[in-house]
Amino acid sequence: MKAAAREDVELRRKQQQVTKKLTLLNEFVDALKKRYLHRTLLERNVLDVIAMWLQPAVKDDQRNCLITRGLLRSLLEMSGITQAHVERSYIGQVVVAITKRAHETNDNKLMASELIYRWARLRS
């Protein structure tokens, strides 16, 4: 999954069409739905990979909205996320940025806000 994000960054630099993440999105989301994998994925820093995927490729790109929606839903359903996981990754910064994007859909902003609220409660 990291490789797909890196390939898309490289394609973007070459000003070519960015499609690697979109091609693998369903496979990634399906893996994130498997509760028995959550602990292992979190230990292997899946939040960093998700943060890489949530970085916008191009403003106002419909594909970005699809990727963001799928991954935010997966994060909302993921169990076992602790304060240490959030602090160790940069996912919190990326999710906060989603709430501030002018071109982001309202649904995605609401899901991002819910995640921020949940993660803020982890500190209590």
Image: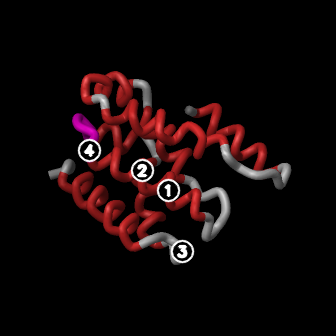
Left or right: 67 as drawn, with respect to 96? right
Q: Quadrant of residue 115?
A: bottom left
Q: CA distance from mark 4 to mark 2?
A: 11 Å
User: Residue 88: x, y in percent?
Assistant: 40, 38
Which circle's residue, 1 or 4, is located before the other in the chain?
1
Q: Nearer the viewer, mark 1 or mark 4?
A: 1
Q: CA distance from mark 2 to mark 3?
A: 17 Å
Q: Look at the image and say whether residue 66 sits in the magenta stretch.
A: no
Mark sitting on residue 66? 1
**SS class, disc 4:** helix
Cα separation between marks 1 and 2: 6 Å
CB under 8 Å between discs 1 and 2:
yes
Residue that badge 2 annotates: 70
Q: Which numbered disc, 1 or 3, marks the residue closer to the eye?
A: 1
The structure residue drawn at horizontal position 24% and vertical position 56%, both measured from the top left corner, is 120
Secondary structure of the magenta portion, mostly?
loop
**51 displayed left or right of 40:** right
Judging depth in this view, the residue of 83 and 70 nearest the camera is 70
Frontmost of labels 2 and 3 is 2
Local SS, label 1: helix
Residue at 52% over, 77% down: 102
What is the x, y in percent for residue 22? 58, 46
Residue 67 at x, y percent in the picture: 50, 52
Residue annotated with mark 3? 103
Q: Residue at x 24, y 60 (%)?
A: 117
Question: How would you rate the neighbour count of disc 1 (Cα within 10 Å): few for under 14, some for 14-19, many for 20 or more?
Answer: few
Secondary element type, mark 3: loop
Label 1–label 3 contact, CB within 8 A: no
What amino acid type is highlighted by mark number 1? Leu
Give the residues drawn in magenta, as a range: 77-82
Distance (Cα) linking label 1 and label 4: 17 Å
Indicate which disc residue 77 carries: 4
